[in-house]
Image: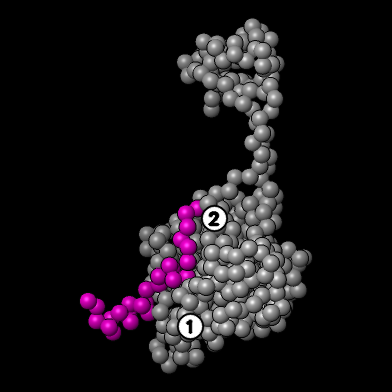
Amino acid sequence: MLNPKFKYVLLAFIIVLGGIFVLKANSIVRAQGKSESIPDKYIVVFKDNVVNPQDVADEMARVHGLSIDHVFTTAIKGFSATIPQARLDKVKSDSSVQFVSDDKVVEASAQTTPTGINRINATSNTNEGNGIGVAVIDTGIDLTHPDLQANIIANYSCVRGKKTGKDDNGHGSHVAGTIAALNNTTGVVGVAPQAKLIAVKVLNSNGSGTWSSVICGIDWVTANIVKYNIKVANMSLGGGGSSDNNCGNSNNDALHKAICKSAQAGVTYAVAAGNDNSDANSSVPAAYDDTVITVSALADSDGQSGGLGSPTSYGVDDTFAGFSNYGSVVDIGAPGVSIYSTWKSGGYSTISGTSMATPHVAGAAALYIKSHPGSTWSQVRDGLVSAAEGLNAGHTDISGLHPEPIVQANNL
């Protein structure tokens, strides 16, 4: 059994991402578009031993009276054609044919606006955070994701054995999508779709790491503020600890001191309150009330205010999520239940947690800084709180633990 003092030290120095990431879900890839068969349109696939697909296709067209659209010679051997029903069986029975598939309608995947983006009215703002650098201090970001790649301007790794900020977990990519997924025709859209993303990998493929790796990330971000115009950092992570409200100088807290120095240099930190349904004063960096914006999670099912949506897995619509930490250090809330966003390997996933709430605020901070250049972190916090939705103005708190407002992005 561990010595109690050693247990405390271990809690203080090892990050367990599961404390911030309530549902470590597998990637949920949503296929979009239709799958309707086109009448009399078929794809004929030849057997592998067919040597010259073009010649065989031409001969079959002559014999069966077909109108060929395309001939395939490499990925598969075969052709697509209009084949009347009266001739289909004869085509299928041809000695060169392996099988025949229906030709079907396919469409470009339409862009989806996640419920969280709608709930904070981000799409109502013409300000898209153009050029504001947002560091995602996490498991990294999928550097080639089609919904993120154009906005990623830098990456760095503090994890031993990993040379880049590539995400091998999924969590950081999900966070990045909520902040700044592109406003294009596919996938999802972020709160600040013209902000620039900086992938800072401090957590491994299991979503865990050390305070020293997190400090490494903060240190790198602070050293590169000017180079990448880094104005915001998202930290959807946490571990056990408390604050001395003196930037760690009174209790020898290196993490606290590092964040304070970085904030003083011009970076606004949005951090997760945690998912233990307990006082966030016992979790850091959430407890660092003198230098971060701490974010709780709202349960929202319909992307609208007013509590008219169906109940969620973690509470009634437009109430605070049952897992969310609370307390005097919490500054603001944001949607954090069933949030749909980007994932590793080019995918998309729906997960829950204060980790998912925090990037809504990080994105909103980028918008605020874009329209209020030169703002300090506390001015950003106060500006977001001032523009936020107050209690009972669209959401309620049946627990009596969450007086904080819900971030709104439409007037930033």
Mark 2 Cα-neighbour bin, 10 Å: few <14, some 14–19, many ≥20: many
Query: How far across and down, in percent of the image, does residue 270 sit?
Result: 57, 75
Residue ID at (51%, 10%): 95
Residue ID at (60%, 69%): 316
Q: Is 320 or 366 nearer to us in this picture? A: 320
Was residue 165 drawn as part of the magenta stretch in this picture? no
Res. 269 in view: no
Location of residue 292 with respect to 143 vertically, above or below: below
Mark 1 Cα-neighbour bin, 10 Å: few <14, some 14–19, many ≥20: many
In the image, taking residue 4 as reference, residue 357 lies left or right, namely right
Location of residue 260 with respect to 118 vertically, above or below: below
The residue furthest left is 1
Secondary-structure class at tag 1:
loop
Q: Which residue is mark 1?
A: 279
Query: How far across and down, in percent of the image, does residue 353 sit?
Result: 52, 68
Res. 53 in view: yes
Residue ID at (55%, 87%): 328
User: What's under tag 1, amino acid-wise?
Assistant: Asp
Was residue 2 drawn as part of the magenta stretch in this picture? yes
Asked which quadrant contains residue 242, the reply is bottom left
Location of residue 169 with respect to 247 vertically, above or below: above
Pair 1/2: label in front: 1
Q: Which residues are magenta?
A: 1-27
Residues at circles 1 and 2 in contact by the CB criterion of under 8 Å: no
Q: Which residue is mark 2?
A: 349
Disc 1 versus disc 2: distance between alpha carbons? 29 Å
